[in-house]
Amino acid sequence: MNLLWFSRNPYSDVLFKLFAVGVLGLMGLGSPLVLPIAIIVALTIPSGFRSAKLDAKLRRDLPQLKAGDEDNLLIAIFKTLKQSGLETLAFAQRYTLAKDLLQRHQESHAKWFTRVALSVLYSVSLLGGMVGAVGAFIPMRHWHHIASIASGDKNAFHKQQIEEADKALQENPKDVKVYLKRGVARRMMKDYAGAIADANQVIQLDPSSSKGYSLRSLVRRSSGDIEGAEIDWQKAERLIQEQHIEKASQSLKANRNDVEAYLDRAYAYHQLHNYKAALKDYNRALNLDEQNSWAYLGRGGTRYELKDYKGAITDANQSIRLQSDLAEAYDLRGKARLKLKDNKEATADKQKAKALRQNEDREEN
C-alpha cells in the first residue's frame, strides 16, 4: 500500500511507516515476537525518506521515462545519485538505493486499474492481518510451526522453478533467459555454486549481457565475496553504458542534430571515465542548443574531472544563468572553487545548494 499510494511523497512515506511502527508496537505489548518487526520497520524510515526524495527528483527531472525501459531507468537512477552527491556511498548502499528507486518508479507508473486491484487485494490482506493480530497471543511453539511451513512452501516454489528450468534447458541448452531464471532460484535456495555456474553460462552465451554480471554480483555478495561482487557490478554498469553509447550512436546516424543523443552518449562516456569523448559530445550538444542548462552542467562536471576547474566554474555559471534554482550547478561550482582554494565562495555555493534542496522539499510537501 505504501509503494502504491504513499511512497511518492517523502513525508507521507515516513508517516505511513510511523503508523505501522505504532500499530506493531501496540501488538508487541501482547506478544514480544512482534516487537523486532516494529524495530526493523523503524530502522527503514531514514533510508525510505532518502529514497522517496530521490524518486520525487527522478520523476520531476525525467517524467518521460517509462517503467519498462529498465536500462534507461537505471542510467537515470545512477545519474540522480551522482547529482545528489551520493556516488561516494558504499556499494551495498548504492545498490539498495538503486533497487528501491527502480521498484518505486515501476509502481508509480502502474495502470490505475492495476493500482486499484492491488489496493483491494492488499486491503483484504490487511484485514486478514488484523484478524491474525489475535494470533499474537498464540504460544511461541505454534509460531515456529507456522514459520517452518511458510519456509517450506517458499523453498518448494524455487525448487519447482529449478525443475522447470532443467526441462527447458534440455530442449534448448542455449536459452539465456532460462539460465538467468534458474540462477535466481538457486540463489534464493542458497545454492551459490549453482547460481554462479548459471551466471557464468549467461556470460559465456552472451558476453554483452549486463544481466549475467548483475546476477553473479548478487550471488557473490550473498556468499560473502564482496570484492568479486563489486568487480562484477562495475562490469555490468560498463556494459550498460556501452549499450547506451551504441544506441545513441545509432540515433545520431539517423539524425546528426539529435541533442538528446549527444547528451546521453556524453553521460555514458563520462561514466566510463572517457572524459575527452564526453567533452566532445557535450560541445556538439551545446553547438546545437546553447540554452541547455543541463548540457552546461554535464560539460562542467567533465571539465572538473579533467582538472579544468576554471572551465567547470564557467560552465556552472552558464547553467545557473539559464536555471538559477539548479542546486547541482551550485554544488559543481562549489567543488571547483574549493579546488582553487576559494574557500569562502565554495562555502557560499554549498549553502546555496542546500537551501535550494530544502526549498524543493517544502514545495513537494
Image (cartoon, rainbow, N blue to C red):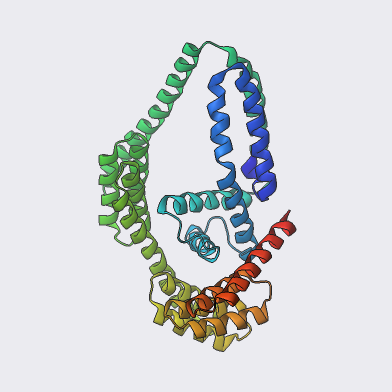
Q: Residue 296 in the image: x percent, y percent?
A: 56, 80
The residue positioned 59% from the left and 74% from the top of the image is 329
- Which is nearer the eye, 171 or 54? 54
The residue positioned 44% from the left and 69% from the top of the image is 244
- Which is nearer the eye, 304 or 53? 304
State left or right for residue 13 relative to residue 314. right
Q: Is residue 165 above or below residue 362?
A: above
| Number of dots carrying numbers | 0
Q: Residue 284 in the image: x percent, y percent?
A: 50, 86
> Looking at the image, can residue 352 be seen?
yes
- Which quadrant holds residue 358? bottom right
The residue positioned 29% from the left and 36% from the top of the image is 191
State left or right for residue 202 relative to residue 103. left
State left or right for residue 138 relative to residue 214. right
Q: Residue 171 in the image: x percent, y percent?
A: 28, 43
Q: Is residue 302 above or below residue 29?
A: below
Instruction: Please identify the quadrant where the N terminus is shown.
Output: top right
> Looking at the image, can residue 114 be seen?
no
- Which is nearer the eye, 131 or 91? 91
Q: Is residue 130 above or below residue 281?
A: above
- Which is nearer the eye, 24 or 67? 24
Q: Residue 239 in the image: x percent, y percent?
A: 36, 64
In the picture as drawn, the residue positioned furthest to the bottom comes out as 287
The residue positioned 46% from the left and 54% from the top of the image is 94
State left or right for residue 335 relative to residue 244. right
